[in-house]
Each structure stands twice: as structure tokens, then as C-alpha cells.
Image (cartoon, helix red, strand yellow):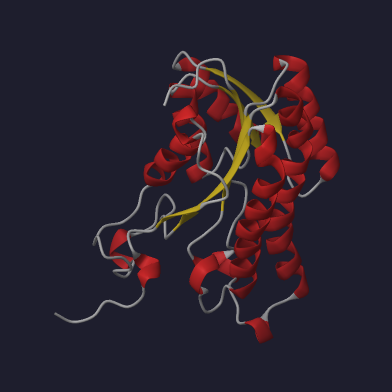
């Protein structure tokens, strides 16, 4: 899955899955545009990539703002002349603010939809013209296993991520004739740094906790030439969590 000569944009690249993905693509040879709303953390990830011999540029980006997204894309084209890969990782489930539908606030709902769904749409829309001009490109968006089954307290998040899958499938239909592959990855529970693994219930059939590498491995495949015939798919990376309740033997 070599990516030499490819230019990849990764949003939410200062986060847990985002930073792991950015570093994985760089290790495969891609030049990575490290995008995050936190400029300092984005720069730290870019510095780590360049320190390891890779190529990267940090760009402060708020995916909720079309102006910010379009400026980032323009800067990328100005710097590198092309965009081969877009990985939409920016998002969040607002676990600390989780609430039932009847107890949720408008501010939280709008924030969840803005960053998880509209951010994906804005970024994909911003890069697609360049990819069509090139006649090639790969777009991978991170959705969630919750988009398939929901979860109490996360209706807004589940709805946003289900929208990401539907959007990606529809966009895939539109741009596949231009040589562009659009797909999704839907992770299960990936504990954040500092989370006590003992506090996480047994939620999958493999009986172990996911790491960000389990997600970035699938992303690396989908943005590679090996996935050239994969179009409009949603790869679920959850250890079987979305299969449903375990039965007794």
C-alpha cells in the first residue's frame, strides 16, 4: 500500500485516530496535510512526521466553516499542486455531554451535526473539483458503528454518522466515473488515551479493545491503489460489535 507521490489531507489529524492515520499515510510515502482546529497540536503531529523523515504541513482548519476548509484546500493546491487523498476524521461523540433526545440541547445537537456531518460534506465538496481535474482521487470518511444500530444517549451522533454513510454512497455514484473512489470506515469503540480499559464493557466478539491502528489500517488500504475497485462501501471495524448481543453457548 505504497503512497509515494500522493498528497493526502487528513482532518481531525491532531486527535487519536486522526494523528495515527496521518502518521500511517506518511510512513507509506504520502505527503500529509495535517488539519485540525487546534493549530498547536496539528503542528506537533506534522513535526513528528517530518522528524521521522516524512513530509507534512500543518494547517489550522475548522471543518465547520466553508471559508476555513476552502482556504486549506487552496493552500494545499498552491503548495503541492494536487490532492490525491482526503480522509475525513474530524468529529466527536460529545460523550461528556451525552443525553437522551428529550433532554438534549439545541447547541449540542447543532455542534454534533456541524462537525460530524457538515464538516465531511464541506471538505469533500472543496476537494472534488481538483480530483475531477486530475481524473483520480480517494475520499474516506470516518463514520461509526453507531450509525448502524444507534445507542442510547447518542441519537444526534448516530444520525450524523448515518448521514456520512448515505452522503458517501451518493457521492460515490456521482464521482466514480471520474476515477474517484469514495468510501467509509465505521469504527466501534476506540478508547481515548487515559481511558481505563477495565471500565469498558465487553462489547465485541473478539474480546479485546480496539486501537486507532485497527482503523488506520483499513483507511490505508482504502486510499491505496489496491482499493481501486472499491466504491461506495462502508467498512465496519468493530470486532463484531454491530452483530448484536452474544448468545450463550
The quadrant of the picture occupied by the C terminus is bottom left
Residue at figure coordinates x 41%, y 45% from the top left: 212
Residue at figure coordinates x 56%, y 67% from the top left: 96
Q: Position of residue 101 (x, y in %)?
A: 65, 82
Instruction: Residue 87: tell me if it is visible.
Output: no
Against 247, residue 130 (above or below) is above
Q: Position of residue 242 (x, y in %)?
A: 40, 68
Residue occupying the far bottom of the picture = 102
Q: Quadrant of residue 88?
A: top right
Side of 135 relative to 222 (left or right):
right
Against 143, residue 32 (above or below) is above
Side of 92 relative to 171 (left or right):
left
Residue at figure coordinates x 49%, y 28% from the top left: 225
Q: Closest to the observer: 84 or 38?
A: 84
Q: Position of residue 72 (x, y in %)?
A: 76, 31
Residue occupying the far right of the picture = 67
Q: Position of residue 46 (x, y in %)?
A: 57, 25
Q: Closest to the observer: 178 or 22?
A: 178
Residue at figure coordinates x 32%, y 59% from the top left: 239
Q: Closest to the observer: 243 or 177?
A: 177
Amino acid at each position: 500500500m505504497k503512497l509515494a507521490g500522493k498528497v493526502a489531507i487528513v482532518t481531525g489529524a491532531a486527535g487519536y485516530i486522526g494523528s495515527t492515520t496521518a502518521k500511517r499515510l506518511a510512513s507509506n510515502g504520502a505527503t500529509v496535510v495535517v488539519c485540525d482546529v487546534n493549530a498547536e497540536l496539528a503542528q506537533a503531529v506534522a513535526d513528528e512526521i517530518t522528524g521521522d523523515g516524512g513530509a507534512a504541513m500543518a494547517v489550522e482548519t475548522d471543518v465547520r466553516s466553508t471559508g476555513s476548509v476552502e482556504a486549506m484546500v487552496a493552500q494545499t493546491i498552491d503548495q503541492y499542486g494536487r490532492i490525491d487523498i482526503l480522509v475525513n476524521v474530524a468529529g466527536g461523540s460529545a460523550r461528556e455531554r451525552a443525553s437522551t433526545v428529550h433532554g438534549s440541547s439545541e447547541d449540542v445537537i447543532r455542534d454534533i451535526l456541524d462537525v460530524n456531518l457538515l464538516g465531511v460534506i464541506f471538505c469533500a465538496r472543496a476537494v472534488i473539483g481538483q480530483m475531477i481535474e486530475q481524473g483520480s482521487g480517494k475520499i474516506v470518511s470516518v463514520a461509526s458503528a453507531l450509525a448502524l444500530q444507534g445507542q442510547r444517549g447518542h441519537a444526534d451522533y448516530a444520525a450524523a454518522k448515518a448521514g456520512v454513510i448515505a452522503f458517501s454512497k451518493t457521492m460515490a455514484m456521482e464521482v466514480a466515473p471520474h476515477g474517484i473512489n469514495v468510501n467509509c470506515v465505521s469504527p466501534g469503540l476506540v478508547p481515548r488515551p487515559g481511558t481505563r480499559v477495565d471500565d469498558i464493557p465487553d462489547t465485541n466478539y473478539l474480546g479485546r479493545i480496539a486501537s486507532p491502528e485497527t482503523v488506520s489500517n483499513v483507511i490505508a488500504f482504502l486510499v491505496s491503489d489496491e482499493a481501486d475497485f472499491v466504491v461506495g462501501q462502508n467498512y465496519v471495524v468493530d470486532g463484531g460489535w454491530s452483530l448484536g448481543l452474544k448468545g450463550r453457548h
